[in-house]
Image (cartoon, rainbow, N blue to C red):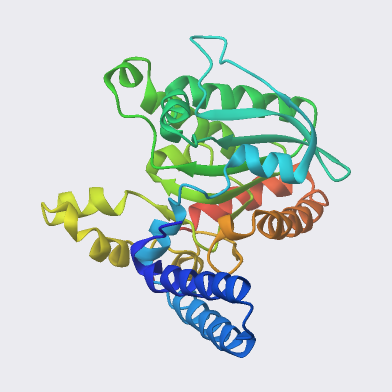
């Protein structure tokens, strides 16, 4: 694996260790002490690198092509998944998957953005950028959750809602606005987790929840760093600087009161150990779901309203 730019020293050292191990097998020479030294060096290098990531480096990890997506986590965490298709108005948007599932002993509704692993699938999934029919499908499924008294789990992973002419003609802004309004008053527990990219209204369109979390190497922002750089400096190359000022990392978001917690990832990112990441997700979701289910519906809605009204208050 080539790795990201800042991971190159790690990749090179891993390659060196593999070459040395191959040499030992081929020549039947005992150089185990040298291998241990290099492996210790590698471990220290990884810890130093991944515990001191910049905001831009976290954005790069959030976009890693091997990062687990919604369907990966559904397969790792849930059972009896029954997918629901279409918005009953236009079509079925493949950028959002939704349906019934079981998380341990809890029957739930699961909704999430879905990207592709290759060009063909990415085109089918529209790179995780939902059209208005995707948001309407999500709302339709959430309304089923309310009707059957099921909690809603949302996995957010999108650069943003699709900005094309067709999407605008079919009411993109209205679809997102309706979701914001209706999710705010939906009388069932909602937990959302940003598992990768959390871009703009495309993320918020399914992100109004009682508890909002982000995975450690995810980002949640009003605009992408590239978009911000293009507006502020007329230069997309300023994206790393934009990432810093946007305060889009989990640590910054927690300080600002935008999210309720940061879910840890394995060293190197979620793609390095999807199973462990999934277990961290399970632990956070089940703990908070248990707490939310004890609240009366009136109290649930009151706290949700207060949560979002208190954001952005200064002084």
Which residue lies at the image location 32% right of the left edge and 50% below the top edge? 224
Q: Can you see residue 152?
A: no
Where is 87 relative to 77, above or below?
above
Relative depth, front residue between 224 and 30: 30
* Number of dots carrying numbers: 0
Where is 281 relative to 208, above or below?
below
Q: Is residue 133 left or right of residue 188?
A: left
Relative depth, front residue between 257 and 116: 116
Rendering quarter of residue 280: bottom right
Relative depth, front residue between 31 and 42: 31
Q: Is residue 220 left or right of residue 182?
A: left
* Residue 80 percent across, percent down from the top left: 82, 31
Q: Is residue 233 left or right of residue 217?
A: left
Most distant residue in the right direction = 105
Where is 168 relative to 106, above or below?
above
Which residue lies at the image location 77% right of the left edge and 33% below the top edge? 101
Q: Can you see residue 51?
A: yes
Rendering quarter of residue 291: bottom right
Where is 268 relative to 65, above or below?
below
* Residue 215 percent across, percent down from the top left: 56, 58
Which residue lies at the image location 50% right of the left edge and 24% below the top edge? 134
Most distant residue in the front direction = 27
* Residue 47 percent across, percent down from the top left: 52, 79
* Residue 166 percent across, percent down from the top left: 32, 16
Which residue lies at the image location 35% right of the left edge and 20% below the top edge? 167
Most distant residue in the top direction = 89
Q: Quadrant of the C terminus?
A: bottom left
């Amino acid at each position: 694996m080539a790795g990201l730019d800042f991971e190159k020293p790690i990749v090179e050292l891993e390659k060196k260790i593999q070459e040395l191990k191959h040499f030992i097998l081929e020549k039947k020479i005992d150089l185990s002490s040298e291998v241990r030294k290099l492996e210790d060096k590698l471990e220290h290098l990884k810890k130093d690198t991944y515990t001191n990531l910049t905001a831009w480096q976290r954005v790069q990890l959030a976009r890693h092509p091997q990062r687990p997506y919604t369907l990966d986590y559904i397969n790792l965490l849930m059972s009896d998944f029954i997918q629901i298709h279409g918005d009953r108005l236009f079509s079925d948007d493949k950028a959002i998957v939704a349906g019934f599932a079981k998380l341990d002993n809890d029957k739930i509704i699961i909704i999430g953005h879905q990207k592709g692993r290759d060009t063909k699938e990415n085109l089918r999934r529209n790179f995780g950028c939902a059209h208005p029919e995707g948001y309407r499908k999500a709302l339709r499924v959430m309304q089923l959750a309310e009707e059957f008294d099921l909690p809603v789990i949302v996995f957010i992973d999108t650069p943003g809602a699709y900005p094309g002419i067709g999407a605008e003609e079919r009411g993109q802004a209205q679809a997102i606005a309706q979701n914001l309004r209706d999710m705010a008053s939906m009388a069932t527990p909602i937990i959302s987790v940003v598992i990768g990219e959390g871009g703009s209204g495309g993320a918020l369109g399914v992100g109004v929840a009682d508890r909002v979390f982000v995975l450690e190497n995810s980002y949640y922002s009003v605009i992408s760093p590239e978009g911000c750089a293009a507006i502020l400096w007329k230069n997309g190359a300023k994206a790393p600087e934009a990432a810093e000022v946007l305060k889009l990392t989990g640590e910054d978001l927690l300080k600002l009161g935008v999210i309720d917690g940061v879910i840890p990832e394995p060293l190197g990112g979620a793609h390095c150990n999807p199973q462990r990441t999934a277990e961290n997700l399970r632990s956070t979701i089940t703990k908070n779901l248990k707490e939310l289910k004890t609240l009366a519906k009136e109290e649930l809605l009151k706290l949700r309203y207060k949560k979002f009204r208190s954001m952005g208050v200064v002084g």
